[in-house]
Image: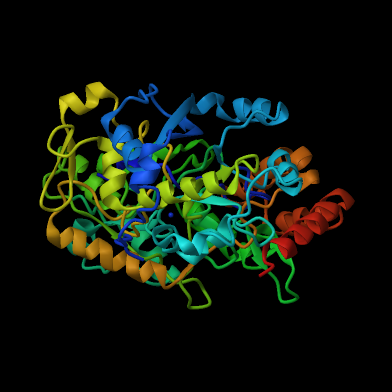
């Protein structure tokens, strides 16, 4: 279960713009639309456009038939392969040919922002609170997907916390008499010990203290854990600024430059891909890395094939030099469902009733996996196992569940099938702790006209300079000159003006 949320972390460190993770709701679904009078009338057709990451399922699935019967509707879902989805959306929008409900990954792109400004979609702000399961989504998620302070769609919810943790070889800590690092000094010392003190006991100098992603962009965790902001931060004057302007950026660059120079982290940072974090940790070569909370369990299962005594445990990030722990809050959604303003209010309310109904664990499982006991089985701990029959019908979290907004489960990035109750309880407690320190990106989703043209070039330059300072190709003095060049650039200043205008609109209450 819950594999459907593994692809949530999309941020790139210090990007100029984002171009685009409460308990599960158990509220009784609304039942409007199920009266005898309604059922005696012709079913209302509801057309939905969404994406798929696999082959498209049929609209004749039993799960969809049950929902159709309950609400006296006929839901027609059009699935478009993810790779072609943005192009398909733009063509349909330009032709004025969007269906009743459309999944949009980012409402703040210029195309959809213009359409929204022109009244193409329903403003759901006055309606959401009438639908208890949708209203139960965390307020921060609605803030993250807000357009000029308004709720213009239903977020496709994902967890806010747990998508990042510091994974540590617990058996190496125990062997060397160390504890998990809680400060940056301790973090460095553990890196050094894991590199130089033969933690695997093979008598060889063949381990590293840390492995992290470099290509195509340095992981944002490298930088934001020092408190300089996730892509953006709000300065003392209330202005939104890019995180690479923050003076704390130099703390991060100096730390990682020191670690790289000392050889206590895996070298070749510019070339390392995300998948190599797992490779180095599960092949007994690296002692720490960043990943999802549940990867402690996943990586441990992998590494036991090489070393049966190995144990990898997720921890909170160490505190920054100012004594505070900084972790990134995920957006809490992966796209938003917009309702075409061409539909009348009666159909709008029917659409909201259906999305409210599907925003529970039970009904999500129906949509994603089919009929319980026939298309899937569920263990006492909640783990889902699809039957072969269910698979043949086309049920899957990455296909048949792509048209619903889902239910919110804050522990999705903490749980995996096969975990012991002890591991699950530990991970839940860790996610609860992360939630007390995680910080959302205040500039999430804000895309300026100037950035649409220039951001690819800007982001590459920023990432390259960060990487070069870490590997020693450039100095911190070079960094200061680099930042000044952006502050002196009229085009970049125009972008910041546009960005702050959008930010002021977004935070309107």
- Residue 451, placed above or below residue 433: above
Between 272 and 124, the residue placed more toward the observer is 124
Residue 135 lies in quadrant: bottom left
Q: In this view, does 388 lie to the left or right of 89?
A: left
Task: Name the residue nearer the viewer: 329 or 367.
Answer: 367
Q: Vertically, is 257 above or below 279?
A: below
- Using the rendered view, name the quadrant where residue 480 is placed: bottom right
Q: Quadrant of the N terminus?
A: top left
Locate residue 189 relative to residue 90 in the image: left or right: left
| Residue 169, x across and y down, in percent | 25, 55
| Residue 89 rendering spot, x and y as whole percentages | 62, 30
Task: Specify whether residue 204 is in view.
Answer: no
The residue located at (35%, 23%) in the rendering is: 58
- The quarter of the picture where the C terminus appears is bottom right
Observer-nearest of 285 and 432: 432
Q: Is residue 65 above or below residue 421?
A: above
Relative image position of residue 283 (x, y in whole percent): 26, 39
Q: Where is residue 348 in the image (x, y as percent from the top left)?
A: 54, 47
Identify the residue at the far right of this view.
490
Q: Residue at x 38, y 21 (%)?
A: 55
Q: Relative to residue 293, is residue 246 depicted above or below?
A: below
Task: Tell me, yes or no, if residue 391 can be seen here.
Answer: yes
Q: How many labels does the image show?
A: 0
Residue at the spot 65% in from the left edge and 45% down from the top edge:
121
The image quadrant that residue 227 belongs to is bottom right
Towards the viewer: 341 or 424 = 341
């Amino acid at each position: 279960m819950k594999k459907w949320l593994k692809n949530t972390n999309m941020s790139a460190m210090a990007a100029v713009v984002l171009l685009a993770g409460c308990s599960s709701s158990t509220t009784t679904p609304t039942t409007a639309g199920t009266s005898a009078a309604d059922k005696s009338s012709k079913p209302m057709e509801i057309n939905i456009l969404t994406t798929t990451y696999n082959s498209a399922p049929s609209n004749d699935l039993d799960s969809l038939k049950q929902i159709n019967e309950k609400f006296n509707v006929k839901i027609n879902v059009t699935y478009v392969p993810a790779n072609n989805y943005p192009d398909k959306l733009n063509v349909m929008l330009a032709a004025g040919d969007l269906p009743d409900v459309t999944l949009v990954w980012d409402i703040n792109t210029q195309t959809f922002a213009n359409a929204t400004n022109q009244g193409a979609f329903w403003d759901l702000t006055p309606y959401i609170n009438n639908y208890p399961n949708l209203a139960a989504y965390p307020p921060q998620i609605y803030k993250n997907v807000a357009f000029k302070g308004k709720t213009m769609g239903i977020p496709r919810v994902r967890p806010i916390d747990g998508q990042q943790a510091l994974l540590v070889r617990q058996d190496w800590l125990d062997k060397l008499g160390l504890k998990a690092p809680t400060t940056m000094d301790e973090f460095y010392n553990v890196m050094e010990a894991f590199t130089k003190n033969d933690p695997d006991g093979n008598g060889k100098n063949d381990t590293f203290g840390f492995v992290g992603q470099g290509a195509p962009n340095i992981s944002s965790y490298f930088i934001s854990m020092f408190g300089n902001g996730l892509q953006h931060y709000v300065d003392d004057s209330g202005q939104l600024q890019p995180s690479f302007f923050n003076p704390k950026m130099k703390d991060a660059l100096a730390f990682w430059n020191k670690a790289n120079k000392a050889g206590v982290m895996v070298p070749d940072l510019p070339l390392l891909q995300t998948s190599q974090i797992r490779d180095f940790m599960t092949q007994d070569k690296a002692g720490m890395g960043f990943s999802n909370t549940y990867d402690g369990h996943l990586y441990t299962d992998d590494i036991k094939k090489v070393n049966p005594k190995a144990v990898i445990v997720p921890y909170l990030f160490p505190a920054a030099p100012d004594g505070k722990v900084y972790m990134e809050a995920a957006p809490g959604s992966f796209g938003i469902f917009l309702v075409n303003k061409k539909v009348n209010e009666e159909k709008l309310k029917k659409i909201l009733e259906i999305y409210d109904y599907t925003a529970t664990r039970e009904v999500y499982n129906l949509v994603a996996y089919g009929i319980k006991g026939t298309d899937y089985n569920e263990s006492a701990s909640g783990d889902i196992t699809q039957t072969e029959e269910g698979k043949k019908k086309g049920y899957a979290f990455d296909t048949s569940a792509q048209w619903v907004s889902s239910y919110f489960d804050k522990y999705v990035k903490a749980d995996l099938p096969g975990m012991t109750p002890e591991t699950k309880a530990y991970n839940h407690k860790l996610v609860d702790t992360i939630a007390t320190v995680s910080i959302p990106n205040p500039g999430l989703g804000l895309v300026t006209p100037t950035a649409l043209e220039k951001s690819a070039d800007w982001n590459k330059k920023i990432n390259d300079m960060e990487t070069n300072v870490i590997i020693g190709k450039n100095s911190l003095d070079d960094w200061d000159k680099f930042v000044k060049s952006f502050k002196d650039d009229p085009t970049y200043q125009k972008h910041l003006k546009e960005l702050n205008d959008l930010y002021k609109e977004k935070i309107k209450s």
